[in-house]
Amino acid sequence: MKMRLLDLTKLTNLTMVAVAATTLAVSSGNVLAQSAANFPSKPITLIIPYTPGSTNDIEARIYQDTLQEQLKSTVLLDYKSGASGIIANTFVARAAPDGHTLVWTSATTTILPALRSDLPYDFLKNLAPVGQTTKRIFLLTAAPNFPAKNFQELVAYAKAHPGAVTYSTVGQGGAIHLAGVWMASASGMDLNFVHYKGASAADIDLMAGRIQLSAKGLVGALPLIKSGKIKLLAIYTGEETALLPGIKTVAESGIPDFDYPSWVGILAPGATPKPVVDKLSAEFRKAVNSPKAMKNWEAQGTLPVGSTPDQFRKMLVAEAARWKKLVTDNGIKAELND
């Protein structure tokens, strides 16, 4: 009988623990749901790792205006440029994880871990993916006197002249450089990478034929292509565009998974509650597809995306792994510009 009483006592204690755990879980869930329901409770600050007046700034201001209308709350832009986005990312990684401080991010965020072992944050632990908002169309262009007329002819020419074809970048270890290394290694080309401090000098040399290849944004490249000052070989981004009918992508022309990483996304502090992250993600998706935004995308050669947090995380993980392998395999060192 004593054993039976002991068993019942144990059972009662276990039941109480289970009930307490369930109550705590329900209570925590209610608190999280309530935090999302009450969000935002103060102004939202979007940290921009660029200087005012750039194309990135124009896009950020669209989100600022649209989110203020959607959320009925103030949205502030705070510019923390420099160090290839490390300053901005670090600031948000250390901010209160309540969804009121966010950072505008790009492919540099996934490139940095491959080049730097001293980052003051882990972007997959200390920052929470909210969503990819857009991607910009980039083109693979050539000097007007370059013999090749398309990507296949480029590959054939480069293989016949190993090391002779020059490709401009705007910084060793940057997205343009790594995309070029990816393209070259995947197609068997031996390209000569020339690192410029800015795009203007590279454009001058491209038009003069002193450099042979360059990756350029669609809006800046189109006038030069139409005037014959540079030549279009392929679309560098993974999708075709109606603005360039009949022009194939590099992916369609021999490197199936190739996609130049000119994208923008939003990150929150790592411990931000999931319901708040999900709400932010939904609001950014609305902003990306708003009438005001859609007009800008068409004018700027930009593609709307509006991914979920899970979709964005998967992309970030895949990109980081790709850059790590490319950097390791090719012995690339960091010389990123601010």
Image (spheres, rainbow, N blue to C red):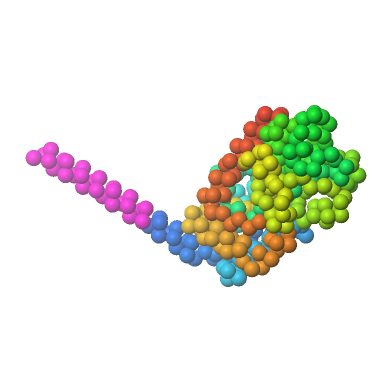
Identify which residue, 96 or 222, lies in the foreground: 222
Residue range highlighted in magenta: 1-26
Classify 183 as above or below 162.
Answer: below
- Residue lying farthest to the right in this orientation: 208
Q: Is residue 193 left or right of residue 8?
A: right
Seen as rendered, the residue at the extreme front is 246
Residue at the location (54% across, 54% down)? 308
Query: Where residue 20 appears, x then y in whole percent?
Result: 31, 51
Q: Residue at x 62, y 37 (%)?
A: 322
* Quarter of the picture holding the N terminus: top left
Occupied quadrant, residue 55: bottom right
Q: Position of residue 104 (x, y in %)?
A: 65, 54
- The total number of labels drawn is 0
Whether 8 is among the magenta residues is yes
- Residue 70 against residue 135 in the figure, above or below: below
Is 122 left, or right, of 22 in this rendering? right
Closer to us: 4 or 180: 180
Query: Secondary structure of the magenta portion, mostly?
Result: helix
Q: Nearer the viewer, residue 182 or 35?
A: 182
Task: Identify the residue at image location x=60%, y=53%.
Answer: 132
| Residue 337 in view | no
Q: Nearer the viewer, residue 230 or 324?
A: 230
Q: Is residue 161 magenta?
A: no
- As drawn, 292 above or below 86: below
Where, by quadrant of the figure, is residue 318 drawn? Answer: top right
Residue 286 in the image, given as x and y percentages of width and height: 57, 64
* Occupied quadrant, residue 210: top right
Residue 218: tell me if it is visible. yes
Q: Position of residue 103 (x, y in %)?
A: 64, 54
Q: Who's the residue at 82% across and 43% down the image?
A: 142
Image-based side of 11 in relation to 187, left or right: left
Instruction: Name the side, left or right, on which 134 lies relative to 281.
Output: right
